[in-house]
Amino acid sequence: PGTSWQIQYSGVLDTSLDVDMYDLDLFDTPQAIIDQLHAEGRIVVCYFSAGSWEDWRPDADDFPPAVIGDTLGGWPGENWLDMRQLDALGPIMAARLDLAAQKNCDGVDPDNVDGYTNQTGFPLSYQDQLAYNIWLAEQAHIRGLSIGLKNDLEQIPELVDYFDWALNEECYQYQECDLLLPFIDAGKAVFGVEYEIDPADFCPQANEFGFSWLAKSYDLTAEVIADCADPAYSAAEDTSG
């Protein structure tokens, strides 16, 4: 808890921030950038989607049509995956984890691991999701990678022991951040991003909880609109819930 960080998935990479951890795209980030950040003493976490098919990825043709479901609203070229079909999906995700290890990522940030709460085109259950997420965590650990739980708030009580940290989007927007506290209680970092609300409305409580929270734009470029670690945001001003 309290680890400083930057998250950037698009645009020209800016490695100049004095933070402990960078969360960068697994496929798009050049090896030289990862090596540079390591030389500067930074931790590098590599992002990939574990629950959706993206038509622009270099391994997009490896996915059989039977595992590709409905589109993710607002994200062109991206469709939900049927994570129940682990015989077909497992080798593809294992190859992505292998790539993360080969590129010397310190950890992975697998996205879209809450398909069971969305309209995916598949009858995914709570238990289906739980089994898949535990599989991901175990596979990451086999490769010496840390792994973060992305969103999936409802399953935190059952997954906190399997995952090394958590990363959330917009829990303050939806007033559900208290669900992340089991990670803090376990001594594990909680990273987060808000896109729409005033940092003054969430930073004080985020700091009080021990969260590492940023305000960013949806396209996740290099720009940091606000970092709650800024001394301007004091827990004494907390009025959020």
Image (cartoon, rainbow, N blue to C red):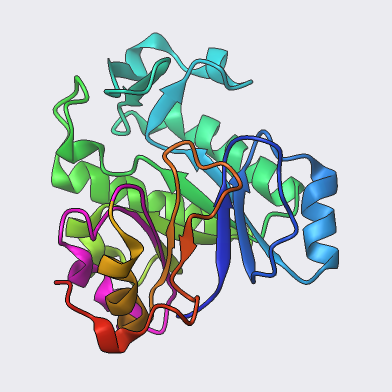
18 displayed left or right of 177? right
Q: Is residue 182 magenta?
A: yes
47 displayed left or right of 40? left
**219 up-or-down from 67: above or below:** below
| Residue lying at 19% horizontally and 72% vertically, measured from the top left | 178
Q: Camera-side residue: 124 or 119? A: 119
Q: Quadrant of residue 217?
A: top left
Q: Quadrant of residue 158?
A: bottom left
| Residue lying at 78% horizontally and 39% vertically, measured from the top left | 30
Q: Quadrant of residue 65?
A: top left
**65 up-or-down from 9: above or below:** above
| Residue lying at 40% horizontally and 50% vertically, measured from the top left | 135
**97 up-or-down from 150: above or below:** above
Q: Is residue 90 magenta?
A: no
Quadrant for the N terminus, please: bottom left
Q: Camera-side residue: 229 or 211? A: 229
Q: Camera-side residue: 43 or 147? A: 43
**189 up-or-down from 167: above or below:** below
In the rendered image, residue 147, in percent from the top left (x then y), is placed at 49, 59
40 displayed left or right of 26? right
68 displayed left or right of 27? left
In the rendered image, residue 190, in percent from the top left (x then y), is placed at 40, 70
Q: How many marks?
A: 0
In the rendered image, residue 170, in percent from the top left (x then y), is placed at 28, 53
Q: Camera-side residue: 193 or 197? A: 197
In the rendered image, residue 54, in percent from the top left (x then y), is placed at 47, 22
Q: Which residues are magenta?
A: 167-196
| Residue lying at 16% horizontally and 40% vertically, measured from the top left | 117
